[in-house]
């Protein structure tokens, strides 16, 4: 039988109690019997006789508190650093030995040769023009100027603008001492007008007058009033007359035919207006396209036929370069200007600048030899004076197709100037 710790303790406690009781009884006996040398002075006291010591029932054994075995001190486990996990070294496949690619020099990029269309063979023809050197003194340059004014319903403002800025146009002629004369007609080719010289429009009385009719100024008188002679006599009256006569009104036909009107004018006044030795300058002012029935080239050729040297007839145009709800592009007039070497400008621009440019261009011709056509690009122009080739001392102006001598190289009066150049057939 296995004794538990509790049973052992209970047994030991019981044994100690029994032994303690035996020793106490023995002690009392010894005290009573021993001690012969000791006089008992204690008086005699009748003590009651105790038959026996009452047996004391043992106190209930209190189960001892179980001894709790002390918890064994557990030494702390040493912290063991975890063994680092070593990733297994990946098996490296051996890099295959790659033979180096031989360096190939890049093939140079060759731009494809552009396909050149075969150049068309241009046939050229030689043109030879002759001129006589004029007197280089004062009043030597002569020019006849025809104004062709659109008199349709939308042109009132433009006519006023011409009148107000006319002095900027004519000043260069007066300062140079040019011999000029002018006439005015309209783009209306109905029976009443159709190239007739008009005295203009009386702006205040609203009365249109046609020169040559009974009771009105004659064509010859009007031409005189608009000439260099009249300007030299009384410049103020000359300017006033032009401003009055240029108002041709705004009640004319809306079918504008400026090129036909110019041809009609020449058929009527060729003998009385044009001078053989003078330049002929036509200035068309319109905000609408020309509606003449024939081609532009035919009208240009007819106008040029009135001059011995075709280059002495130029057409200048002040027309619309862009269309709007109020006007159309004057492309036919622009074409005529280009064919004759004249200039053109936009009617919507300031008339001061436009008239100044046109006047300057005409003045430039008075000291130049105007060619009938423009030389073919890249070809040579040959200038001769009395048969001798002039390699210098002159310039070619491509704007108006003319040759002009430098001031120190001007040929003597009466010299024969020959100009050879090539044009496309």
Image: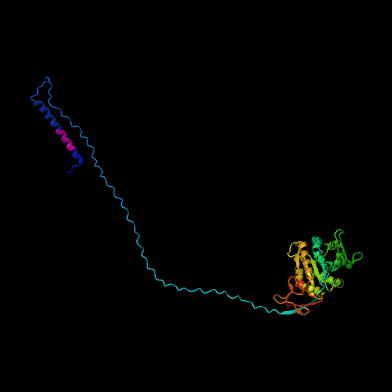
Position above or below: 4 against 181: above
- Report the residue at 89% width, 68% height from top: 220
Spot the residue most to the front. 408
**Residue 234 placed where, x, y %?**
87, 63
Outermost residue on the right side: it is: 215
- Specify the quadrant that holds the N terminus: top left
In this rendering, position of residue 239 left or right of residue 374 = right
Circle count: 0
* Residue at point 10%, 28% (across, down): 30
Closer to us: 98 or 88: 98
| Whole-percent x, y for residue 127 in the image | 75, 78
Residue 345 can be seen in this image: yes
Picture coordinates of residue 132 (x, y %)?
A: 81, 76
Give the percent coordinates (x, y) of residue 264: 84, 71
Q: Main secondary structure of the magenta part?
A: helix
Which quadrant of the view contains residue 114?
bottom right
Q: How is the image coloured?
A: rainbow
265 or 165, which is in the foreground?
165
Along the viewing direction, whichever of 252 and 82 lies nearer the viewer: 82
In this rendering, would 309 be left or right of 376? right
Quarter of the figure with the C terminus:
bottom right
Segment colored magenta: 10-19
The image quadrant that residue 102 belongs to is bottom left
Q: Up-down: is 176 above or below 48?
A: below
Q: Is residue 260 magenta?
A: no
Q: Is residue 287 visible?
A: no
Residue 19's quadrant in the figure?
top left
Between residue 261 and residue 218, name the one nearer to us.
218
Residue farthest left in this picture: 36
């Amino acid at each position: 039988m296995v004794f538990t710790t509790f049973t052992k303790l209970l047994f030991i406690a019981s044994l100690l109690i029994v032994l303690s009781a035996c020793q106490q009884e023995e002690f009392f006996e010894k005290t009573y019997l021993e001690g012969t040398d000791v006089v008992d002075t204690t008086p005699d006291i009748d003590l009651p006789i105790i038959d026996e010591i009452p047996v004391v029932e043992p106190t209930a054994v209190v189960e001892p508190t179980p001894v709790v075995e002390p918890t064994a001190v557990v030494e702390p486990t040493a912290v063991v650093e975890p063994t680092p996990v070593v990733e297994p070294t990946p098996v490296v496949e051996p890099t295959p030995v790659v033979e180096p690619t031989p360096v190939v020099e890049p093939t140079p990029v060759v731009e494809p040769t552009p396909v050149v269309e075969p150049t068309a063979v241009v046939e050229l023809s030689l043109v030879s023009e002759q001129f006589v050197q004029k007197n280089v003194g004062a009043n030597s340059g002569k020019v006849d100027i025809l104004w062709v004014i659109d008199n349709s319903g939308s042109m009132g403002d433009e006519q006023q603008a011409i009148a107000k800025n006319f002095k900027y146009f004519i000043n260069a002629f007066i300062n140079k001492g040019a011999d000029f004369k002018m006439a005015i007609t309209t783009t209306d080719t109905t029976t009443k007008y159709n190239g007739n010289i008009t005295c203009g429009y009386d702006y205040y009385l609203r009365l249109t007058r046609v020169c040559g009719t009974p009771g009105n100024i004659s064509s010859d008188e009007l031409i005189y009033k608009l000439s260099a002679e009249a300007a030299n006599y009384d410049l103020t009256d000359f300017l006033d007359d032009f401003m009055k006569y240029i108002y041709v009104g705004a009640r004319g036909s809306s079918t504008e035919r400026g090129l036909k009107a110019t041809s009609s004018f020449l058929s009527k006044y060729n003998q009385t207006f044009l001078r053989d030795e003078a330049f002929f300058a036509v200035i068309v002012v319109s905000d609408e396209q020309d509606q003449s029935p024939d081609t532009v080239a035919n009208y240009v050729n007819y106008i040029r036929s009135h001059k011995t040297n075709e280059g002495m007839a130029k057409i200048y145009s002040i027309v619309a370069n862009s269309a709007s709800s109020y006007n159309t592009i004057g492309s036919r007039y622009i074409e005529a200007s280009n064919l004759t070497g004249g200039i053109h400008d936009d009617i919507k621009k300031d008339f001061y600048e436009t008239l100044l440019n046109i006047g300057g261009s005409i003045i430039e011709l008075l000291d130049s030899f105007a060619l009938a056509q423009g030389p073919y690009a890249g070809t040579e122009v040959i200038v001769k004076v009395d048969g001798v080739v002039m390699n210098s001392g002159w310039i070619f102006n491509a704007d108006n197709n003319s040759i002009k001598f430098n001031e120190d190289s001007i040929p003597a009066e009466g010299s024969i100037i020959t100009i050879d150049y090539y044009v496309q057939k």
